[in-house]
Image: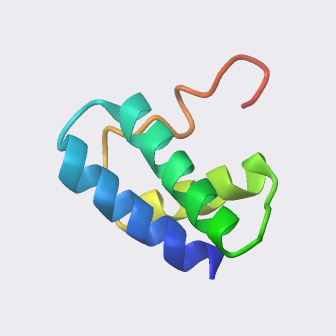
Amino acid sequence: MLYGIAKTAVYAAEKIFGAKMGKDKLAYALGLVNRWLETKGLKFDEDVIRAAIEEQVKKLDIEDWAVIDDAPEGEE
């Protein structure tokens, strides 16, 4: 379930933000997944959500995402 919504969030962010703007796409995808989970009464650790998004970005072979290289200091 989490990976499915993460995939949808990645696709949506790609459509909305297009090329570049990796940090904005990541923030959008994180927010979208969190809001969807809230509607279902579910809560996942932020690191788990981020990992699900990262996996989808890698599976879809999408570039220009702020997933690994742009992680805040201490979070890599």
Residue at the image position 67 percent from the left and 56 percent from the top: 49
As displayed, is residue 19 above or below residue 39? above
Where's residue 57, x and y in %? 43, 58
Of all residues, the one furthest to the top in this rendering is 73
Left of 26 or right of it: where is 36? Answer: right
Residue at the image position 40 percent from the left and 70 percent from the top: 8
Please tell me which residue lies in front, 47 or 16.
Answer: 16
Residue at the image position 58 percent from the left and 74 percent from the top: 3
Residue 63 visible in the snapshot: yes
Left of 6 or right of it: where is 42? Answer: right
Residue at the image position 32 percent from the left and 51 percent from the top: 13
> What coloring was used for the rendering?
rainbow
Where's residue 12, x and y in %? 30, 59
Where's residue 64, x and y in %? 31, 38
Quadrant location, the C terminus: top right
Residue 61 visible in the snapshot: no
Please tell me which residue lies in front, 64 or 10.
Answer: 10
Quadrant location, the N terminus: bottom right
As displayed, is residue 26 above or below residue 43? above
Where residue 9 sits, quadrant-wise, is bottom left
Where's residue 43, x and y in %? 79, 62
Of all residues, the one furthest to the bottom in this rendering is 1
As displayed, is residue 31 above or below residue 12? above
Where residue 21 sits, quadrant-wise, is top left
